[in-house]
Amino acid sequence: MRRFLLPLGIFAVLVGFLAVGLRLNPREVPSPLVGKPAPAFRLAQLHEPDRTLAPEDLRGRVWLLNVWASWCVSCRQEHPVLLDLARSGAAPIYGLNYKDNRQAGREWLVQHGGDPYVSSAYDQDGRVAIDYGVYGVPETFVVDKNGVIRHKHIGPLTAEAVRDRILPLLKELNGA
Amino acid sequence: MPRPLAATLRAAALAAAALTAFLLAPAIRAAEAVPAAADPALEARVMRVAEELRCLVCQNQNIADSNADLARDLKNQVREMLGRGMTERQVIDFMVQRYGDFVLYRPPVKETTWLLWFGPFLLFAGGLLVLFRKLRARQRALATPLSAPERLAASSLLAPAGSEDGGARP
């Protein structure tokens, strides 16, 4: 009997590792930027090219930065969630229009039910996105009043993620 | 019944598009492959750094091998930074600051990766230990002489078949 205990134990450990490992999402790479100041940039806005958007202009406010593009398929899935979030007034959402065409980006917003963003920065060559460690659009950052990134959501925002993670965090950050 | 006709047309159009894409692909790829830096020494350094960096879109490729958009952008970034006179170390640190350790194709040795680096050796050592203990136990079992009743039992078992040599010596 005893000779089977060891292989059985090893097998159980292996199953345990696999059970955990297979549930993890390899796409969700923890960002080293959480807890660090949001990288500075100053970019022309999508709708008004002669006006700029910069994180330092938003100091003292809790805000969201959502990286999006008209060519991004999962952004469509996320869009209604963003519209709802914007309507709720929990925090202003700013967009980072990533490697897009200005015209296409504007039209996409019209076609997909409206513009949830206070304004979008137009990151044509994707340089700012590299500073933010973006590797899959859409991505969403929560930035606090001191300009520090407090949370990063990779992939499309879902109603559940907003309810369970984003909204409580916004409440906490706005309360402090 | 315009449906089947439309479907056929669509399929034909798709096939034509696919064929065009197939025929054009080498030309497009060739255009992409032209390095931005005409300087071969710089290009070699770019590739050396690119081989150390993981493509986060494709994950199991480094950005030197990857043709993903992001990989190309990152290669351009690396080229530009090296061109500005930054060292390879500085460029890699720049990437780690933004994308985390995961961007390194060779994981660094630190507390969180100890299991990853030393786990296999630990398993190997454990295996060796088990093997040695088994062998030692077996050797000890062979070394202990049979007791008198055991010898008797053995010879009585061997006796009926024992007309030939049988290979068993007392």
Image (cartoon, helix red, strand yellow):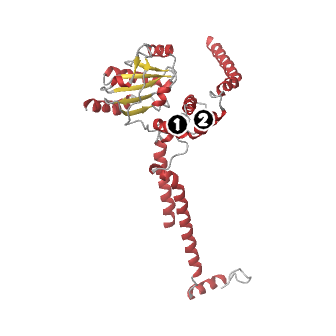
Q: Are marks 1 and 2 on the same chain?
A: yes
Whether residue A175 is situated above or below residue B170 in the rendered picture: above
In this orientation, which residue lies closer to the viewer: A66 or B99? B99
Residue A13's place in the image compared with B89, above or below, is below
Q: CA distance from mark 1 to mark 2?
A: 10 Å
Question: Which numbered disc flags the more N-terminal residue, 1 or 2?
Answer: 2
**Circle 2 chain:** B
- Residue on which the image places disc 2: B46
Q: Residue furthest front?
A: B85
Q: Is residue B47 left or right of residue B114?
A: right
Residue B85 in percent (x, y) is at: 55, 34
Looking at the rendering, in which quadrant would you find the N terminus of chain B?
top right
- Residue placed under numbered mark 1 in the picture: B91
Disc number for residue A159: none
The quarter holding residue A84 reads: top left
Q: Is residue B137 left or right of residue A173?
A: right
SS at mark 2 in the image: helix
Q: Residue furthest top?
A: B2
Q: Callout 1 environment at 10 Å: few (<14), some (14 to 19), or many (20+)? A: some
Q: Are marks 1 and 2 in contact (CB under 8 Å)?
A: no
| Residue B61 visible to the viewer | no
Q: Is residue B7 visible?
A: yes
Q: Where does residue A165 sit, x and y in percent of width and height? A: 35, 33
Check disc 1 and give the amino acid type. Answer: Val
Question: In the figure, residue B40 lies in which quadrant?
Answer: top right
Helix, strand or loop status at disc 1: helix
Amino acid type at image mark 2:
Val
Residue at figure coordinates x 54%, y 62% from the top left: B125
Is residue A133 left or right of B51 when viewed as pictured? Answer: left
Which chain is disc 1 placed on?
B
